[in-house]
Image (cartoon, coloured by chain):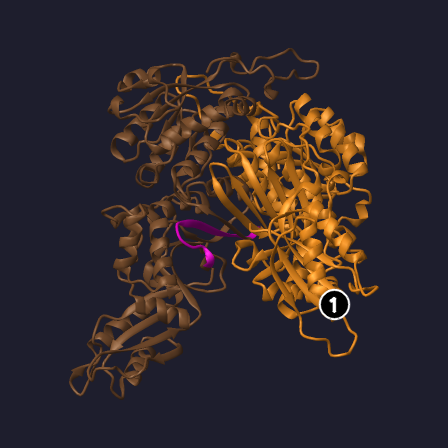
Chain colours: A brown, B orange
Amino acid sequence: MSERHPSAPSDTSPPGGERRRLHGGKPVGIALLGCGTVGGGVLTLLARERERLAARVGAPLEVRRVLVRDPKKVRVEACDVRWVTTDVDAVMSDPEVELVVEVMGGEGLAGDLVERALRAGKSVVTANKALLAARGKQLFALAAEHRADLGFEAAVGGGIPIIRALRDQLAGDRVERLFGILNGTSNFVLTQMTELGQGFAEALADAQARGYAEADPTLDVGGFDAAHKLLVLATLAFGAEVTEGEIAIEGIRELEAADIEHARRLGYVVKHLVVGRDHGDAIELRVHPTLIPRSSVLANVSGVLNAVKIEGAALGPCVLSGRGAGDLPTAVSVVADVIDVSRAIVAGAPGLVTRSVAIARRPLRAAGLTEVRWYLRFPVADRPGVIAKLAAALGDAGVSIEQIEQGPPPAEGDAPVDVVIVTRTAREDAIRRALAAIELGAIEGQPFVRRAPRALRIEEP
Amino acid sequence: MSERHPSAPSDTSPPGGERRRLHGGKPVGIALLGCGTVGGGVLTLLARERERLAARVGAPLEVRRVLVRDPKKVRVEACDVRWVTTDVDAVMSDPEVELVVEVMGGEGLAGDLVERALRAGKSVVTANKALLAARGKQLFALAAEHRADLGFEAAVGGGIPIIRALRDQLAGDRVERLFGILNGTSNFVLTQMTELGQGFAEALADAQARGYAEADPTLDVGGFDAAHKLLVLATLAFGAEVTEGEIAIEGIRELEAADIEHARRLGYVVKHLVVGRDHGDAIELRVHPTLIPRSSVLANVSGVLNAVKIEGAALGPCVLSGRGAGDLPTAVSVVADVIDVSRAIVAGAPGLVTRSVAIARRPLRAAGLTEVRWYLRFPVADRPGVIAKLAAALGDAGVSIEQIEQGPPPAEGDAPVDVVIVTRTAREDAIRRALAAIELGAIEGQPFVRRAPRALRIEEP
């Protein structure tokens, strides 16, 4: 891996100047932390595109160490056994290792190793959104302090170049709104529910059978994975440092086939969205299932695909979509960062690429102040006066109604019937107030809401 | 514009090292060539985001010169009159100008000025796809020779970060296929024809009335603008140096409402596409109106929007869409390049960002060897035996038929009726051979094809 690339373009002579061997003509030494499927993809791409990458970087890329827990478990053909080690110190104290690629996952050990690498002045590329969501601010500060780069394109949206778009393309603009479908499992489940009429449990079982969902799917269908990604995007889009506990996170577990069907009849598709908005004085960050118009470009992002729509003040709308997960797409993003960061190292300017991400505390707008249109579904007793009660409670809370629909009378005498209400734009606290009043409401001494109402936000991305 | 930004992140001390003033603490001097609407947008963004950009770059950006033909015509509020000059030498000989932004357009003078700037070791950012299509190879070589950057994100797809995606995100992968809707005028005209049933002339007049089409629309509706953009993308996607004269370019002028309608009935939408494919031994580049399935993500890119779908060997599909033109989106792309290139200058590594674009002669696959499915429309005499003749001619040329449809009998006795044939995948030379035979064909001594057949390619992007 250490031969010189004789015709590297960065090695051409400046006119009238002396011939300069960039980086002393040395290769860029790389260590991998972890060697699972993404790590294997990275090693495969580094081997397959070796000459092109050397030309692009201006020096060869040389893998020197691959840190693993158990060398016997390494199953990657492109991994030379001589690289494999279990010795952390051997990796961190190797002065030839200038770039550390973290593909082991998890927050604890991975975070400690990334910190240690940055403190040693080594640049880091990571695919770990949970780590960035939990410790991003400290890691960016460490990278800046030690003149190291911290690349994380692979952490959000797999192979989609969303980090580059926000960090580089929009560097001279301001992001006003951001919408994302960032969890492939949830999107697959919702697509199955929409296209095949499956219920949540059935669609989830299908996703698990295909390997799109974990045995414990909480991180995905609970909305937490999408929230981690939103927090990472928020640092770039809004320069905002926000932690997971500060934002309301709703997953898709409670969605019923009836909601998907009502939404469809009203012209909407239900998607699990992350939403970010900059109001100037405060930002708004939300993660929840959402009704979006069927004609929206995000409505057509199906299955395990991911997509992000950014709206820049000057740029206008820009949509990026592609494979949000998968070993090879993620590996492509890791290698893209490896190339950028290596070029900066070779040019003698480590830290150039990613260092100046400005992060500050920015106030979050309280959830209650959020204003959107709402879809409300009330499973109610089928009797006269119910709609008047619902409308009155909403009116009392200051919520205007755009549309009311009542399902057909129930087949069995006393089964609940769905009343669906679409509101005009309303503040969330007003909606919550109305829902509380409605759940306590009664007609002739009998509560008329039979099961918990369902409230979903409507967005027009 | 020349005050120092005291807290620029790039200015922090390395641990244990001496404090280093990057770029000697100087601002990065910028000259604009041209000051029309895009130039005005660039100056506006540079002024509006001054502090953020200085923090991002590590030094302030200082506009020093704005070269124009006629200073009286400068109508840009953000343009300081003291910058305005008509003196080329004053711009080129100013040692403080390290970055030249070309937003004047045209190939001749603009090309000469860009060359001169590169020879003087100044980096260049340009929005000029016609210039790159005509003289790209020489300009990239000059930039490499003189250790300068040549940024051109704004040249293709307006505000969509397609250049970054190809250059950086896919640097470790190989592009297998590329599809693009890259001309907003053509896409607007086709959208009007599809959605409102307008004919070409009416839709074009509509586009002209709204300012989406020039008085002479040849460059746009003739397909040439899209072809220029494809040639620029081909350098990045396939490392290929190709000139305009080498590829077949078809515009949308000859499309009729009947084609749009037949396509719709068959489940397709007609889009003006650029297509690129890497066959390993050769590449394929085409520009033409194309039938694509209505469910394709590109089918839903309407009006003046642009979109590109890239398929990487490892990355899989990735779609980027947004505003393909417009002063502000284009200015955002220019400023993004200005930032990247300025950071490299400040880090003492000019040329780092864009220099290593590898360009080589790569053989083009001959158009006749292209293999796609075809939509063929034959306005024929309404008499028995015609379909047999059409099918026989196609069969003789080795073309298999997937579907044949004949329109209803004509209202007037002798008017032609459309026969539409969808073929299986067929080589273009076979299709041409069949069409030639059919145009010469006769039944009982009478030619049965009444007007020139229409042949459109079908793609499934």
Image quadrant assignment for residue B175: top right
| Residue situated furthest front in the rendering | B444
Left or right: A21 as drawn, with respect to B135: left
Q: Residue A411, located in which quarter of the rendered image?
A: bottom left
Residue closer to the observer: B187 or A137:
B187
Residue B294, percent from left and from top: 55, 60
Q: Is residue B211 visible?
A: no
> What residue sits right under mark 1 in the picture?
B202
Work out whether residue B117 or residue B24 is closer to the camera in this orientation and state it: B117
Assess whether residue A12 is covered by the magenta stretch.
no
Q: Position of residue B165 (x, y in %)?
A: 54, 39
Farthest residue to the left: give it. A445
Give the residue displayed 81% in from the left and 48% down from the top. B72
Name the spot of residue B344 as percent of width and height, x first: 57, 28
Secondary structure beneath disc 1?
A: helix
Amino acid on which the number 1 mark rests in the picture: Glu
Position of residue A100 relative to residue B286, above or below, is: above
Picture layout, residue B94 above or below residue B370: above
Q: Could you tell me if residue B60 is visible in this image?
A: yes
Region in magenta:
A300-316
